[in-house]
């Protein structure tokens, strides 16, 4: 279980869908996904934890951070 205090602070820009409706991606869901990825979960697991929400740029940044930490540990 993920504790709210363990989640990163996320402030997403306002997002809407082409038809005018709001997306399901909230700051809280984004924080859950980023936290899960930074702990080692893959995208699918992280999205499942946040009700199947996806967003590419932040996910890639979280994955890059994890990979960087892992490389540092392995080569250190």
Image (spheres, rainbow, N blue to C red):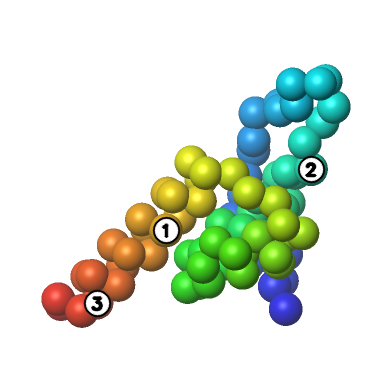
Q: Is residue 76 left or right of residue 53?
A: left
Q: Which residue is mark 2?
A: 24
Q: Nearer the viewer, mark 3 or mark 2?
A: 2
Of the pair 60 and 38, the residue shown nearer to us: 60
Q: CA distance from mark 2 to mark 1?
A: 22 Å
Where, by quadrant of the figure, is residue 23 drawn?
A: top right
9 to the left or right of 61? right
* Residue, far right: 21
Q: Where's residue 21, x and y in %?
A: 85, 27
* Residue 73: image tag: 3
At which x and y percent is residue 6? 63, 67
- Image coordinates of residue 27 in percent, x first then y, are 71, 45
Q: Is residue 35 visible?
A: no
For marks 3 and 2 on the same chain, the one whose residue lies earlier in the sequence: 2
Q: Is residue 23 left or right of residue 11?
A: right
Q: Is residue 44 above or below residue 18?
A: below
| Picture layout, residue 66 above or below residue 31 | below
Q: Which is closer to the viewer, label 1 or label 3? A: 1
Q: Secondary structure at mark 3?
A: helix
Outermost residue to the left: 75
As measured in the structure, the alpha-carbon distance from the residue carrying label 1 to the one carrying label 3 is 15 Å
Q: Residue at x 20, y 79 (%)?
A: 74
Residue 47 got which mark?
Answer: none
- Location of residue 53 in the rendering, given as x and y in whole percent from the top left corner: 70, 51
Query: Which quarter of the rendering shows the N terminus?
Result: bottom right
Q: Quadrant of residue 44?
A: bottom right
Q: Residues within 10 Å of mark 3 (few under 14, many from 20)?
A: few
Which disc, if any, is residue 63?
1
Q: Secondary structure at mark 1?
A: helix
Q: Earlier in the sequence, mark 2 or mark 1?
A: 2
Residue at 15% x, 77% y is: 76
């Amino acid at each position: 279980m993920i504790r709210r205090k363990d989640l990163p602070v996320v402030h997403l820009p306002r997002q809407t869908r082409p038809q005018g409706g709001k997306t399901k991606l909230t700051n809280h869901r984004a924080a859950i996904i980023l936290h899960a990825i930074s702990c080692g979960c893959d995208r699918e697991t992280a999205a499942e934890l946040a009700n199947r929400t996806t967003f590419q740029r932040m996910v890639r940044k979280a994955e890059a951070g994890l990979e960087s930490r892992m490389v540092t540990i392995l080569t250190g």
